[in-house]
Image (cartoon, helix red, strand yellow):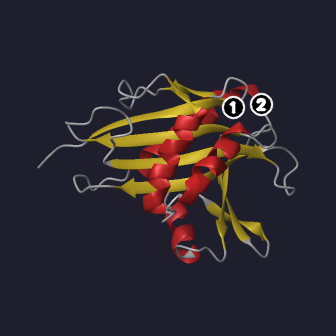
Amino acid sequence: MTVMLYQSAVYKINTHKEVATRVCFEEYECKLLPKEIPVRDLAKLFSKMQKVCFKDHNLGNANTKRLIDLFSADTEKTFIVGLSLGFLPNAKNYMDFADAGAATVQKSRLEMLPYQQPWINEVCRAKMRDGSNKSPVFIVMNMIEKYITHYLMKTSKRIDGMYLYVEKKPEHGDPAFLINYYKKYGFVEMEREDDEYFYMKKKLN
């Protein structure tokens, strides 16, 4: 059986330079990932993944354009993304992944919290080929948590955890399944909800 090699890192987005810079963690290999990725290329990478996990066919490059806007926003900005890409031995560059996990993180109050907090979005698993039973999303969530505790919480005492929300009526997927899925990562449902979303939080120290 072919062994898939995973390369994993958090990318910190610089909206002014329109690049994302790699942040590695000692637990995970990252040397095959570029030290910097232009925001446009990062959007192309995500849209390629989302063709699989969100069934988004990126007609007219609409999803790529949406992601460029998401990564370039100055308000409630997406400031990091987590990536874990699985490669087969014949892969030539980082776009040749055979398996992938990813998520974005934005700072927002969502008009419901007293201070901005990190919100996880765009959680995606794109398995292109068989070869591994482990999910790279676990690696992505772990790296995001480490980034928040090692970097954000060291500079801001107001950051108290990581947050996400689940659509009540998504185009794809089942909300109950997703809520139970995120509970495996330590998230719990918040008392607050509205007509569109369930909200979840993982408290961090």
Tell me the quarter of the image containing the C terminus. Answer: top right
Q: Residues within 10 Å of mark 2 (few under 14, many from 20)?
A: few
Q: Which residue is disc 2 drawn over?
A: 156
- The relative height of residue 93 versus residue 51 in the rendered view (above or below) is above
- The relative height of residue 130 versus residue 198 in the rendered view (above or below) is above
Q: Position of residue 60 (x, y in %)?
A: 57, 56
Q: Secondary structure at mark 2?
A: loop
Q: Secondary structure at mark 1?
A: helix
Q: Which residue is disc 1 drawn over?
A: 152
Name which residue lies at 61% across and 55% down: 62
Task: Check disc 1 and give the amino acid type.
Answer: Leu
- Out of 52 and 189, give the one closest to the viewer: 52
Q: Residue furthest left?
A: 1
Task: Check disc 2 and give the amino acid type.
Answer: Ser
Judge left or right: residue 74 versus residue 170.
right
Q: Position of residue 113 (x, y in %)?
A: 84, 53
Judge left or right: residue 101 versus residue 201.
left
